[in-house]
Image: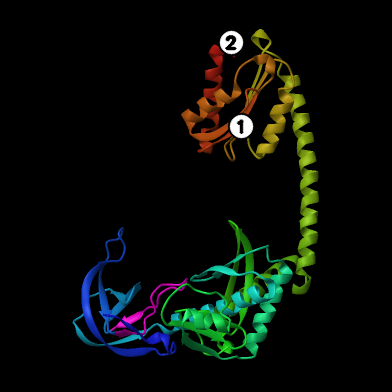
Amino acid sequence: MTTRRLYYDDSFERDFEAQLLSCEPVMVDSHLMVPAWGVVLDRTLFYPTSGGQPHDLGCLAAAKVLDVRDEGDEIIHVLDRPLELGPINGYIDWDRRFDHMQQHTGQHLLSAIFQERFGLPTVSFHLGSEISTIDLRGPEPSDAIREGAERAVSRVIFEDRPVTVRYGTAEQFAQIGVRKEVDRGGILRAIEIEGADLQPCGGTHVKRTGQIGLLLVRRCTKIRQDWRVEFVCGQRAERAASADFQLLRQVALRLQCAPEAAAAAVERAVAERDANFKRLRTISDQLAEAEAALVLLTNPPGPGGVRLLARTFKGVDAEYLGHFAARLTREEKTVALLVSRDDGHVVFAQHPSIGKDMNTLLRQVLEKMGGKGGGTRDFARGRLNDTAQAESALSAARTLLQPAGTGV
């Protein structure tokens, strides 16, 4: 039996009466094995997941509605408990419904503006729990285009234009200028935003654009050949704007400037950070050179003319270890085995005159101790999973080198 969809004509109804026609066990989640029952009614206000819009929630009698599924002519209401056949009352979660109505009508308006003013058609829509998205096809929508679309949407919202439901065939809608034609027979339902958009749609929508409240375009990212635009409407937009201001206020407080000066202050701080980083890197490299020269001076070659330098470090980063090892192994017949006790970084390096394979040595040590890394025959670096294994890693490396004739 075909379920009559009450939300088609009035999305603002919150409760209804219906006849419960069937109630059977269904699967909610194949992993959780949660017991649930699928109910079919002769009429319903509950919107099923479809067209990028999630389903409604609410109650049928004493049962909670967990899911609403579109099964062609019938709508299946998935409940947390079984119910008896016969008359039943139902009511929807109005806050969720109205939020979805704001997002969906906002999407229609935003998509219409992007297409008509900027030649960017919408190829998909998703209404998420926090953020909604549309995927646009065409060139990247610049900041100016996104801001222009947002302003145009705001003007239509402030004009409080009527949003109406219209019925007709695909041919009739094509003749009066539908945004996106559909290849479907029979009578179709369409949503019309006066003077802005006409689009076939089975979703729930507000009655006037003023009820969208506010629309904010958040960001744009590349998704395969399309551009995904994130947006929020209504109370979501209010929350987002408030959160944005609080974040800006906190940043301004930390930078000791007015909120309107935060962007310039951040630019200065980033420039200072980059300059300080370069100076620190230069000083660190110079220190590594000096310390390496001292180590070479105080550690003469051993048997066979080989100089083996095995050492753990604390308070230095991976770049320092690398520079230190590179300086040491510029000297002939020198091997450097270095490990950081802070973060487990490992550097094994040699002068080519040693003739061994540091990459193989590193892999052998990491297989024993746990970790990842790699490199070349003369220079390899990695990281231990457990920093407590630093000394053990050095010991293992020395042991593996001993039969290689390095004189260790």
Numbered disc 1: secondary structure: strand
Residue at image location 53% in from the left, 27% down from the top: 363
Q: Is residue 340 above or below residue 400?
A: below
Residue at mark 1: 381
Q: In which quarter of the image is residue 131?
A: bottom right
Q: In which quarter of the image is residue 233?
A: bottom right
Mark 2 is on which residue type? Answer: Gly
Q: Is residue 404 above or below residue 54?
A: above
| Mark 2 neighbour class, 10 Å CA radius: few under 14, some 14 to 19, many 20 or more | few
Q: Can residue 381 be seen in this view?
A: yes
Q: In this view, does 205 lie to the left or right of 74?
A: right
Q: Is the magenta stretch mostly helix, strand or loop?
A: loop
Q: Is residue 221 left or right of residue 98?
A: right
Q: How many labels does the image show?
A: 2
Q: What stretch is highlighted in magenta?
A: 43-60
Q: What distance separates the C-alpha of mark 1 from that of mark 2?
A: 23 Å
Residue at image location 65% in from the left, 15% down from the top: 354
Q: Residue 405 carries which label?
A: 2
Please state which of residues 183 and 304 is positioned toward the viewer in this rendering.
183
Closer to viewer: mark 1 or mark 2: 1
Of callouts 1 and 2, the N-terminal one: 1
Please state which of residues 115 and 40 is positioned toward the viewer in this rendering.
115
